[in-house]
Image (cartoon, rainbow, N blue to C red):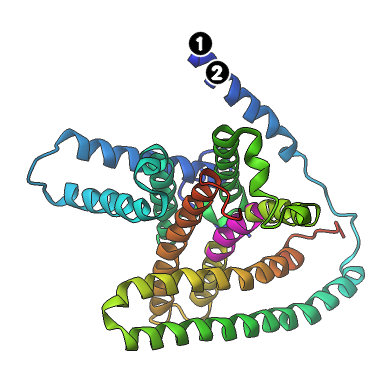
Amino acid sequence: MRFWKVAGLAAFVLIVAIPALAAGEGSGLSVLQKIPYYQMVVLGAPIGLGAAAAGGGIGMGHVVNGTATATARNPGLGGKLMTLMMIGLAMIEAQVIYTLVIVLLLLFTNPFHI
Amino acid sequence: MEAPTFLDFIPLPQYISFTWLIIIGLIIASLIVRSSLKILPGHFQNVFEAAVDGIYKFFEEILGKEEIKKHFPLIATLSLFILAANLTELIPYFDPPTSKLDTTLSMTLIVFVYYQYLGIRRHGFGYIKHFTGPIWWLAPYFMPLEIIGHFARILSLSVRLFGNIFGDDMLLAVFFMLFPYIVPIPVMFLVIFSALLQAFIFALLSALYIADAVSEPAHE
């Protein structure tokens, strides 16, 4: 009985994955006609990433500031505070990385099938 | 942007063959340790004992003593697999499976469905109380926000891991293209640190979501 449950779930998973094999192609425009899209992307992407990195950098600076001050006041808690700092830094860095993912998607994966 | 790997002779996509390679590697390592367990551990067994014990003690603080026993296999497997998968990024001709959104999204969906199922099984229909917020007559305002927040957890958990490892991969590739002699070494240290941190963060957040779903709604 348990074997059939597992086999049924595995078959379901495999069948659900079939639509992933269908991929769209570009509409066959020449290089010259694709340039306006890439112009816009090349203009906007570094500005967006720069703004994201600025905000992220300020936030991370506050985190490290708090941790350094707290460790200076209470050096016995140093290990726990460092763990908390690492968690905070990873959370903030994730925000910057969301912007990076969008930029990489726009630049390299041709989402509009141009 | 596909890099050549040493498993190219297998006709599957790269992330599937490397996922299976890591799984088989972890299983072989565990079987080797299991076949020669001693009271006074040797070197190899000591490493595994430290890893498993460290993960158990750390997550016992978050989840509590009786919950950790039920959920420890999932959390430890996730953390060890993601750690191994992230670290294979540094070996040439390897393609880390976590650098594709497919692997990370599937792991996130497993955790998401698991903790929702836990919450529904534990609280039944009262699971809705987790979504209503602190004041009961503001519930129609809070519920869409909480539901969107829960779905945003899928996106954030998967994209955090994917973006970190994929970005580190790109960074290494660019540095090796520019000046392949001494300069990539600090970048590789950064990659090791980031790999450890991301595996730890994924497991920690999964444990926090599970703890949040199983506990009583805190807003009463």
Q: Which residue is mark 1?
A: A1
**Under tag 1, what secondary structure?**
loop
Question: Which residue of the protein is positioned furthest toward the top in this rendering?
Answer: A1
User: Mark 2 Cα within 10 Å, few/some/many (few <14, many 20+)?
Assistant: few
Amino acid type at mark 1: Met
The residue at the point 60 percent across, 55 percent down is B158
Task: Give the chain letter at badge 1.
Answer: A
The reply, left or right, for residue B14 in relation to residue A99 is: left
**Under tag 2, what secondary structure?**
helix
Q: Which mark is residue A5?
A: 2
Secondary structure that dominates the magenta span = helix
The reply, left or right, for residue B185 in relation to residue B164 is: left
The reply, left or right, for residue A3 in relation to residue A80 is: right
The image shows residue B159, relative to residue B209, as above or below, that is: below
Within the magenta stretch, is there residue A22?
no
Task: Give the chain letter at badge 2.
Answer: A
- Relative image position of residue B11 (x, y in whole percent): 57, 38
Residue situated in front as seen by the camera: A48 or A75? A75
Marks 1 and 2: in contact by CB < 8 Å? yes
Please report the bounds of the magenta region as a residue range. B154-164
